[in-house]
Image (spheres, rainbow, N blue to C red):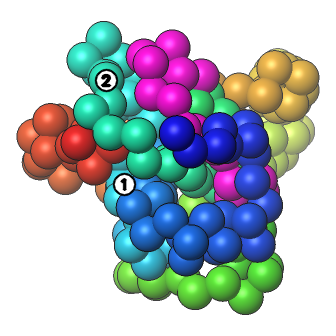
Amino acid sequence: MTDPLPSTVDVAAARKLVSSAPRTRLIDVRTPGEFAAAHIPGSHNVPLDLLRANSSELSAHHSDPVVLVCGSGARAEEARNLLATAGIAQLAVLKGGIGAWEQQGAPVTRGAGKWAMERQVRLAAGSLVLTGVLGSLVAPKLKWLAGFIGAGLTFSALSNTCGMARVLSLLPYNRTPEQDASTLLAALTR
């Protein structure tokens, strides 16, 4: 029996795990657009929304270590909770996500110019706040738009969730290309 994984691993520990246990699965739970923009070589994209939608079908027929990756760690932690509930044992979250991976100089495969979800959220939130503030010069009630976005961002920080990211993940360039869910989930479960 293998030693259980800690709930989180830093970049050095993840790289060591991949080199010492070649059957380690790197599962990236970001949107397909984010994955296409930059991902860890050898990782598989199994978006969090797909895991949520298919959580009742999840079960692993392996005991391979699984390292979950996202932008910063929050979505990977949610995925870890889902997968642990489904009975998948050897799970760890990459501390700091793909950002930490890149900062440590670890290899990254880059694709065409898609933006990370965090950057998309910053653009959308910033644009809405700016629209609310500038628009309030003409229509004073628009200041409430800026207040609403500020309240949403505060709630997002306190709850470690992001409603705007969930909405943005529904946009066509962030959605999973036409692939069978079982094919994507196979990277995790088989």
**Drawn side of residue 166 relative to residue 172, left or right:** right
From the viewer's side, name the closer residue of 57 and 24.
Answer: 24
Instruction: Give the quadrant of the C terminus.
Output: top left
Query: Which residue in the structure is indicated by mark 1?
Result: 45
Q: Secondary structure at mark 2?
A: loop
Q: Residue at x 53, y 22 (%)?
A: 84
Q: Is residue 182 above or below residue 173?
A: above
Task: Say which of marks 2 and 1 sits in front.
Answer: 2
Amino acid at pointer 2: Ser
Q: Residue at x 14, y 45 (%)?
A: 183
10 Å neighbourhood of mark 1: few (<14), some, or many (≥20)?
A: many
Question: Which residue is most to the front?
Answer: 1
User: Which tag, 2 or 1, sits closer to the chain's start?
Assistant: 1
Give the magenta range.
Answer: 81-97
Amino acid at pointer 1: Asn
Image location of residue 78, percent across then percent down: 61, 28
Q: Is residue 63 above or below residue 151?
A: below
Does 68 appear in magenta?
A: no
From the viewer's side, name the closer residue of 66 and 140.
Answer: 66
**Drawn side of residue 128 relative to residue 91, left or right:** right
Which numbered circle lies on residue 59? 2
Image location of residue 31, percent across then percent down: 43, 50
From the viewer's side, name the closer residue of 19 and 161.
Answer: 19
Q: Secondary structure at mark 1?
A: strand
Is residue 116 something one can see in this rendering?
yes
Q: Is residue 44 above or below residue 166?
A: below
Is residue 35 something one can see in this rendering?
no
Q: Residue at x 41, y 40 (%)?
A: 63
